[in-house]
Image: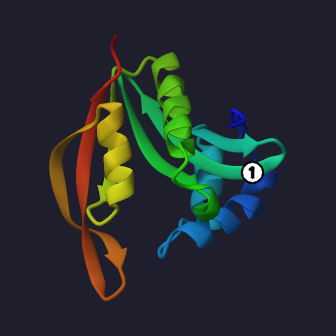
Amino acid sequence: MVEPTFRPMTEADVEAVLKIEFSAFSHPWTRGIFLDCIKSGYECWLMFLGDQQVGHGVLSAAGDECHLLNLTVKPESQSNGLGGKLLDHLLLQGRQRGAETAFLEVRESNQPAIRLYERTGFNEIGRRRGYYPAVGGREDALVMAYTLLD
């Protein structure tokens, strides 16, 4: 497989990002959320295979912590290791900004993502009841953490 490449997300990229976001999630992020993240200086990245955009991710970093806010791979590009490559790239950005611990929330029903995070070394440290909107109500989030120190 060709190795993915990465570049920072800009405001001009948001339309293409939204196409992937809306194809991947029942409750996708909005244009405004992505624009706010870019304007706030978060680590907002695009992932490409060749010239095709296949994913994106957003990470905030402050002090000795970083928070993975969004990790999305196009549905037709999933299940071939790209999520792990994107996750590794985002965690590297967190390390470079001085983070020692990474945190995230994930839908309890998103078993493929949970398996990815566990393979990387994340551990469940808590639960947020009714955190995510879901079809027919709300869904819990698992809170996970990973130590970035070597």
Answer whether residue 73 is visible to the viewer in this image.
Answer: yes
State left or right for residue 16 relative to residue 64: right
User: In this orientation, which residue lies closer to the viewer: 35 or 49?
Assistant: 49
- Percent across and percent down for residue 63 are 38, 23
**Vertical position of residue 44 compared to residue 108: above or below:** above
Which residue does the numbered mark 1 point to in the structure image? 53
- The residue located at (69%, 32%) in the rendering is 3
User: In this orientation, which residue lies closer to the viewer: 139 or 52?
Assistant: 52
Identify the secondary structure beneath mark 1.
strand
User: In this orientation, which residue lies closer to the viewer: 148 or 121?
Assistant: 121
Instruction: Give residue 86's quadrant in the image.
Output: top right
State left or right for residue 18 relative to residue 143: right
- The residue located at (69%, 36%) in the rendering is 4
- Percent across and percent down for residue 43 are 58, 36
- Percent across and percent down for residue 120 are 36, 33
**Vertical position of residue 21 compared to residue 1: above or below:** below
- The residue located at (79%, 50%) in the rendering is 52
Instruction: Give residue 72's quadrant in the image.
Output: bottom right
- Percent across and percent down for residue 7 are 73, 35
**Vertical position of residue 10 compared to residue 90: above or below:** below
Quarter of the picture holding the N terminus: top right
State left or right for residue 23 relative to residue 140: right
**Vertical position of residue 52 compared to residue 140: above or below:** above
Q: Amino acid at mark 1?
A: Gln
